[in-house]
C-alpha cells in the first residue's frame, strides 16, 4: 500500500464508522481511531490527510494544525475564502505545513512538460483540463449537498484544473 516506504509510513486510519475504521485497520495493519480528536493525540502521527466533505476541511485542518500535525487536505481546500485563510493561519501559527491535494499534479504528462520549460522560454501559464461525468444518482450523499460541497459544480469540477506557472510548481 505504501508507495514511498523510504519517505513515510501509514500510522493509523480514522473513520467515525468504527466498523469501517476497524476493517481498514486490519487490511493495512495499522491502528484505527473512530474520532479525529483521539487520533490527533497520537504522538506517532506527524501528518494527516483530510479526505472529508468540503465543509469539514477547515475545522479538522485547524484542529490538526493546533495539535501539531502537518496537513494534506483534499481539494477543494475550503468552502469560503474565510475558511481557507483560517486554515493557512492555523498552519502558520503552529509552524506546520498545509498542502492542498491535486491528484493530477504529478501525472507523467506534466513531468514531461516541465522538462521542456527552459527550451520553450518563459512560461506564464499552462492549463490542462480534465472532464468527467458525475452522476447525481450514484454520487455520495454529501456530493449532493450544497452545504457540504460549497456549491457542487464549481468545487467538484472546477478544482480539477491544473495550472502551472513559471515558478517551481512543487
Image: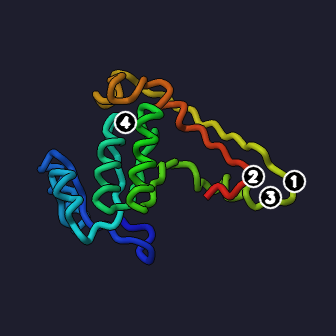
Is 138 above or below relative to 56?
Answer: above
For the residues marked 2 and 4, what is the alpha-carbon distance in whole angstroms? 29 Å
Q: Position of residue 108 (x, y in %)?
A: 63, 56
Q: Is label 2 in a helix, a strand or a loop?
A: loop
For the residues marked 2 and 3, what is the alpha-carbon distance in whole angstroms? 12 Å
**Quadrant assignment, res 71:** bottom left
Is 131 above or below relative to 45?
Answer: above
Q: Nearer the viewer, mark 2 or mark 3?
A: 2
Q: Nearer the viewer, mark 3 or mark 4?
A: 4
Residue identifier under label 1: 121
Residue 26, visible in the rendered structure? no
Where's the C terminus, which quadrant?
Answer: bottom right
**Mark 2: few, some, or many residues within 10 Å (few <14, many ≥20)?**
some
Q: Is residue 138 left or right of residue 98?
A: left
Q: Is residue 17 left or right of residue 130?
A: left
Q: Position of residue 96 (x, y in %)?
A: 42, 61
Q: Residue at x 39, y 51 (%)?
A: 90
Q: Residue at x 87, y 53 (%)?
A: 121
Q: Which mark is residue 166?
A: 2
Q: Closer to the N terminus: mark 1 or mark 3? A: 3
Residue identifier under label 3: 116
**Quadrant assignment, res 163:** top right
Q: Is label 1 in a helix, a strand or a loop?
A: loop
Q: Closer to the N terminus: mark 2 or mark 3? A: 3
Amino acid at each position: 500500500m505504501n508507495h514511498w516506504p523510504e519517505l513515510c509510513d501509514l500510522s493509523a486510519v480514522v473513520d467515525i464508522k468504527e466498523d469501517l475504521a476497524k476493517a481498514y485497520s486490519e487490511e493495512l495493519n495499522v491502528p484505527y481511531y473512530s474520532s479525529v480528536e483521539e487520533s490527533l493525540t497520537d504522538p506517532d502521527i506527524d501528518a494527516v490527510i483530510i479526505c472529508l466533505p468540503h465543509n469539514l476541511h477547515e475545522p479538522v485542518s485547524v484542529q490538526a494544525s493546533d495539535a501539531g500535525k502537518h496537513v494534506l487536505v483534499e481539494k477543494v481546500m475550503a468552502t469560503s475564502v474565510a475558511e481557507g485563510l483560517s486554515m493557512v493561519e492555523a498552519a502558520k501559527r503552529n509552524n506546520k505545513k498545509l498542502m492542498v491535494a491535486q491528484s493530477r499534479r504529478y501525472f507523467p504528462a506534466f513531468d514531461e512538460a516541465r522538462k521542456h520549460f527552459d527550451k520553450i522560454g518563459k512560461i506564464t501559464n499552462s492549463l490542462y483540463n480534465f472532464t468527467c461525468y458525475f452522476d447525481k444518482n450514484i454520487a455520495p450523499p454529501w456530493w449532493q449537498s450544497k452545504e457540504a460541497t460549497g456549491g457542487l459544480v464549481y468545487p467538484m469540477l472546477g478544482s480539477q484544473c491544473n495550472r502551472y506557472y513559471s515558478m517551481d510548481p512543487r
